[in-house]
């Protein structure tokens, strides 16, 4: 379990560094077809449904690969 947490921390730090150095690398986040966005006047409602499904599927695949 400790190894997993260390690896997870390193991955999060690497993603943060990439995001800091190349902000456009994650510009697709939240702008996928199927993400619901509603803007009217001062009201903004955003539901990143498809983005969260993709992140969940990729995360599940990675966790299954590392747990075997």
Image (cartoon, rainbow, N blue to C red):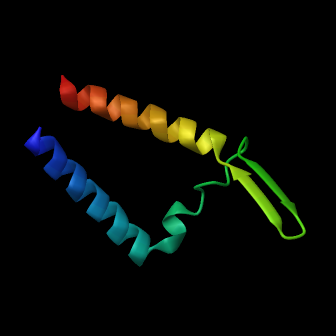
Left or right of 62? Residue 30 is right
User: Above or below — where is 25 with respect to 61?
Assistant: below
Q: Give x and y (percent) for residue 61.
A: 36, 29
Check the image and name the residue furthest to the bottom: 21
Vertical side of 55 occupied by 20: above or below: below
**Residue at the location (21% across, 58% down)?**
10
**Quadrant occupied by the N terminus:** top left
- Most distant residue in the right direction: 41
Q: Position of residue 6 (x, y in %)?
A: 14, 51
Report the label total. 0
Foreground of the two, 42 or 21: 42
Where's the C terminus, which quadrant? top left
Residue at 64% of width from left, 47% of height from top? 48
From the viewer's perspective, tell me whether residue 53 is left or right of residue 46. Answer: left
Tell me what residue is drawn at x 10 percent, y 44 percent.
Answer: 3
Q: Position of residue 19 (x, y in %)?
A: 42, 69
Q: Is residue 14 above or below residue 57?
A: below
In the figure, residue 65 lies in which quadrant?
Answer: top left
Residue 61 to residue 41: above or below: above
x 42%, y 36%: residue: 58
Q: Residue furthest top?
A: 68
In the figure, is residue 36 to the left or right of 28?
right
């Amino acid at each position: 379990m400790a190894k997993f947490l260390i690896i997870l921390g390193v991955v999060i730090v690497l993603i943060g560094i990439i995001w800091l150095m190349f902000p456009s690398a994650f510009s697709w986040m939240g702008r996928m077809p199927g993400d619901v966005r509603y803007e009217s006047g001062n009201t903004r409602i955003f539901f990143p449904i498809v983005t969260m499904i993709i992140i969940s599927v990729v995360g599940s695949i990675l966790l299954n690969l590392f747990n075997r």
